[in-house]
Image: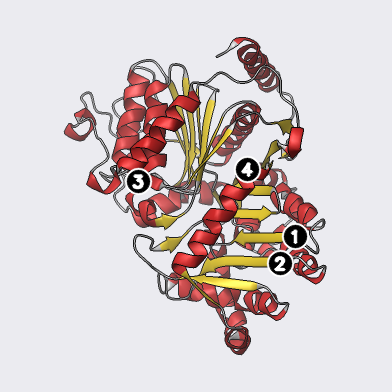
Amino acid sequence: MHGMAGLRRGMASLGLALLLTAGAVLPAHAGAYPWVPLGDDLKFIPDPRVELQLRLYMIRQARESIDVVIYEQGDDEAVGLPVLSALREAADRGVKVRIITHWFFQYLTHPFNESPSYTTNPPTAVPIEYVVFGSPIAVARSGWHPSDGIHGKIMIVDRHWALTTGRGHAEGSLGWIDSAFAMKGALVDQSQTAFEELLAAAKAGGEIHTPTFRRSERTPRQVTQWLPNEKARLDEKGKEELAGLIIWLHQPPPQTLTTEAGRRGRLLHYDFVRQMAQLAPGAADKPWIFEKRLRQLKDPVIDAAVARLSTAGAGSEVRFTSMYAILHPRLKQAVIEARERGAKVSMLTNGELVAPPITTMAYLASINDIADLTKHGMQVHKFRRTSPWWFMHLKLMIVDNTVFFGSHNLNVPSSAANDEMHYEIEDPKLAAECRAFFDYAVAKSTELVDPASAEAARPWGSVARTILDPVLGFY
């Protein structure tokens, strides 16, 4: 840590610890954190291989702590095991490692996933804390819906660096059009506070993984130092980008910061898990009726996006993505109103044939929203598989010089069933980079939705939505 910045982080951490140990009640929702000025505190990383190598570098540099929230923690040889191996090595050299992950998606895509056992059994020199949310045990004990989850994706190292991403720690994510953002400074402080709050809520609603049969010796896979295989290795351009990011990580923060040119940012933590746990008994007649949740829970990501869209009009450009465009009603209305005021609006979503039957059903469940957007003169781009990309997983909104990024899909599933960490940044340079990436994805891998075809498909919308509703949180 550096001087006053280190002191500030230490005082913030001490303050949070005192609140928790004193039994103080934290606010009912974290909401939008205060705006903070930005120096050279953010780096946009669209390449999944560069993101992976930077993640491994940050883990290997850790000296005190590594805190991870990840929706999908795999145990494949390209991404999952290299990350798990690096985390075990860090814990064996004295680093405190804490991991929060979601049960269902791990085992849906990796039925024999060994990640919890790999990290905890046998224990490392400093035992790794592996918190699992959404397991059948937790669902049965606490009354959660099976699709309720913790969807945030962030890693914080030594309370000094952070890396947020849309991707999971799994080989499949190497083929996703997605993004990551490395952070320093005050945004890391906010992220650390949100992590502590989420950890407490996850422990209350989930469980800390405890091995059933304890091992005294490491397995051959635990002894192996896993490195990314050929699928995840960098080309020369990637190596140059990684080298520049490493130099940037170690540069000290500026002594003074201003909001010059609108350069400021904040964390938006939708603490769904804690809000649901605090609902009075019977407040949600049936916890799986998602429309009621939209009215009862406060989602600061949607609040902030709607507020920013309310200022967009003639001359404004709005670009946004939604993996499955089952749009939050308030967001949809705000986008339509921005378009009616003269803003140019484009949306990117997955097409029906990207990964059938999942994307087929999700696209049809979205068709009423898609048809409404096209009817109002907006461009809706359907992602189609093109090498090397096989899936659109980007979570991004750019409104002029404001960028929203993180884990929130800006749709009903995120707002009704998932704990999300998202960021709002005002920065012309970052907005230009994200616009360029959005336009690249559109030009390379999409086709434009025909308004007449979307209108004709409307009858399928209510049918598909009814079928998906019991598992809507997974979308």
Q: Earlier in the sequence, mark 4 or mark 1?
A: 1
Image position, residue 258 (x, y; %): 75, 27
Distance of mark 4 from mark 2, alpha carbons? 20 Å
Q: Earlier in the sequence, mark 1 or mark 2?
A: 1
- Asked whether the residues under the numbered discs 1 and 2 touch, taking CB atoms below 8 Å apart as contact, a structural biologist would say yes
Q: Earlier in the sequence, mark 4 or mark 2?
A: 2
Image position, residue 177 (x, y; %): 45, 57
| Element on which disc 3 rests | loop
Which residue corresponds to the image point at 37% horizontal and 21% vertical from the top-left? 91
Q: Which mark is residue 74?
A: 3
Q: Looking at the image, is mark 3 or mark 2 nearer the viewer?
A: 2
| Element on which disc 4 rests | helix
Residue for badge 2 = 344
Note whether 409 is above or below 195 in the view shown. Answer: below
Q: Which amino acid lies under the numbered mark 2 shown in the image of this protein?
A: Lys
Q: Earlier in the sequence, mark 3 or mark 2?
A: 3
Q: Which amino acid lies under the numbered mark 1 shown in the image of this protein?
A: Ser
Residue for badge 4 = 429
Which residue corresponds to the image point at 23% horizontal and 23% vertical from the top-left? 216
Q: Looking at the image, is mark 3 or mark 1 nearer the viewer?
A: 1
